[in-house]
Amino acid sequence: MVFSLTKRELPEPELDALLRRVLGSPLAAHVELTDGMFNTAYRLTAADGREVVLKVAPPPGVPLLTYERDLMRTEALVFGLMADRGVPAPRVLLHEDGLLVMTALRGTPWHAAELSDAERAALRRELGGIVRRLHGVTGDSFGYVQGPGGATWREAFGNMVAAVLADADRFGVELPDVRPAFAARAHLLDEVTSPVLVHFDLWEGNVFVADGRVEGIIDPERAFFGDPLAEVVCVALFTEPDEDYLAGYGVAGFTPAERARIALYRAYLCLVMIVEGVPRGYTGEEREAHVAFFRAKLAEYLEL
């Protein structure tokens, strides 16, 4: 189990009452899903055999990063937008009071599936096409649904960076002075004129596969409206996107200016990863190694 102060457990009687309300059937079994690091998640099995997944938001009063406020509302909203666009994802059955109940996927997280090279290449092409459909969803403004945002992508992304830097100050996390590096590249963000829906957590653990196909995408809670190039950050986590994904998405590669924008978004993710461990209570040698890695990547992406 991944320990985090943001995780809130529910007793079995509450799980049973919730399942009776959602499915009209009592609880037969439940198991906590431990891969996630923010919400608590359960797989609930009803007496009639149906299964759902329940996510439980952090308890009130737990310190959070600025962008982490009301993430469950964002997740429920984005699942609806994904469904409207034909993006495979769980279907929301209930969203209220820090609880989100959705249909259960039957497949396996991609990173845990045993795949041949050919199967993996086909899935990467399929994922590229799915992400292309996802990026057909546009919003009315830039940034996170729950804020911070902005009238332009330059303004919104600047506010996102400022927010995580303010979070670092609030939680006593020392960081290098990254503001000049972000400011020197901010003009590149003016190329983005349409607020496109970006999942921003599309690593393989959040993609379920079944029967050689992408069954569904989960955990869109970190989603925002901005530059579609930001999706590369987690689709190709700390590496270059492969040819199969790019072919499925419909691009051949990136210009130098686009690569510079991707580096900014990678640097932003590094800032989030460095800071978030403090309010969540992460400790130990593994955490220290992760922070050292993210600090080194931050310096690389911003050429510090």
Image (tube, helix red, strand yellow):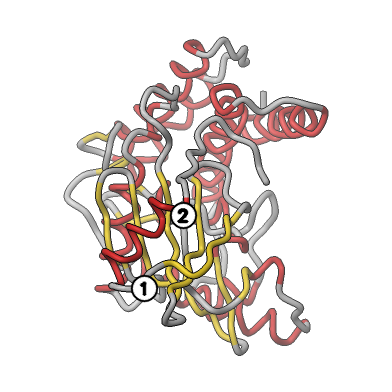
Residue count near mark 1 (Cα–Cα under 10 Å), binned few <14, some 14–19, many ≥20: some
Tell us which disc is closer to us: 1 or 2: 1
Q: Is residue 240 left or right of residue 56?
A: right
Q: Is residue 240 left or right of residue 37?
A: right
Point 61% across, 25% down: residue: 281
Task: Please state which of residues 246 and 97 is positioned toward the viewer in this rendering.
Answer: 97
Q: Which mark is residue 229?
A: 2
The image shows residue 183 at horizontal and vertical percentages of 45, 24
Q: Quadrant of residue 112?
A: bottom right
Point 55% across, 68% down: residue: 207
Point 47% across, 65% down: residue: 44
Q: Is residue 81 visible?
A: no
Residue count near mark 2 (Cα–Cα under 10 Å), binned few <14, some 14–19, many ≥20: some
The image shows residue 45 at horizontal and vertical percentages of 48, 71
Q: Is residue 272 visible?
A: yes
Task: Please state which of residues 63 and 32 is positioned toward the viewer in this rendering.
Answer: 32
The amino acid pointed to by label 1 is Arg
Query: Mark 1 sits on what residue?
Result: 133
Mark sitting earlier along the chain (1/2) = 1
Task: Please state which of residues 190 and 52 is positioned toward the viewer in this rendering.
Answer: 52
